[in-house]
Image (cartoon, helix red, strand yellow):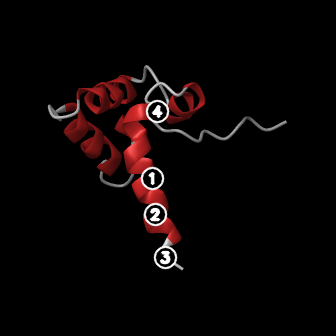
Amino acid sequence: MDAPTKVWRRPSEAGPMGIERTLLVKLVANTGDPVMAEFARELLAGNVTPRRVVESQLYASALEVPASGLTAWYSGLS
């Protein structure tokens, strides 16, 4: 049996130019939203994965507005 495919990469292993890591570092510096800064800090430290965040609803209140904006944008594409 094959080993499971690694889906989540730590931000230090991020895409071609480390864009994901750069965005998380910017979120850490976000003094206007301390919950999102904590979220980014935890991801960067490897203490939590995106899957864990979604499954546990740890940051549901902080992600609700951006997620609904993304949903609205995506539904307007077609």
The amino acid at mark 4 is: Ala
Query: Which residue is tagged 2?
Result: 72
The answer to the question of whether label 3 and label 2 lie on touching residues, with beta carbons closer than 8 A, is: no
**Which residue is located at x 36 percent, y 23 percent?**
42
* Number of other residues with Cα within 10 Å of mark 2, as a class: few under 14, some 14 to 19, many 20 or more: few
Give the CA separation, mark 4 to mark 1: 12 Å
The residue closer to the viewer here, 18 or 30, is: 30
* Number of other residues with Cα within 10 Å of mark 4, as a class: few under 14, some 14 to 19, many 20 or more: few
Looking at the image, the residue that sits furthest to the bottom is 78
The answer to the question of whether label 1 and label 2 lie on touching residues, with beta carbons closer than 8 A, is: yes
Total labels drawn = 4
Give the CA separation, mark 4 to mark 2: 18 Å
User: Where, by quadrant of the figure, is residue 12 drawn?
Assistant: top left
**Which residue is located at x 48 percent, y 74 percent?**
76
Q: Which mark is residue 60?
A: 4
- Looking at the picture, how far across and down is residue 18, in whole percent? 31, 47
Q: Secondary structure at mark 1?
A: helix
Looking at the image, the residue that sits furthest to the top is 47
The answer to the question of whether label 4 and label 2 lie on touching residues, with beta carbons closer than 8 A, is: no
Using residue 66 as the reference point, say whether residue 29 is left or right of it.
left
The amino acid at mark 1 is: Ser
Q: Which mark is residue 77?
A: 3
Q: Secondary structure at mark 2?
A: helix
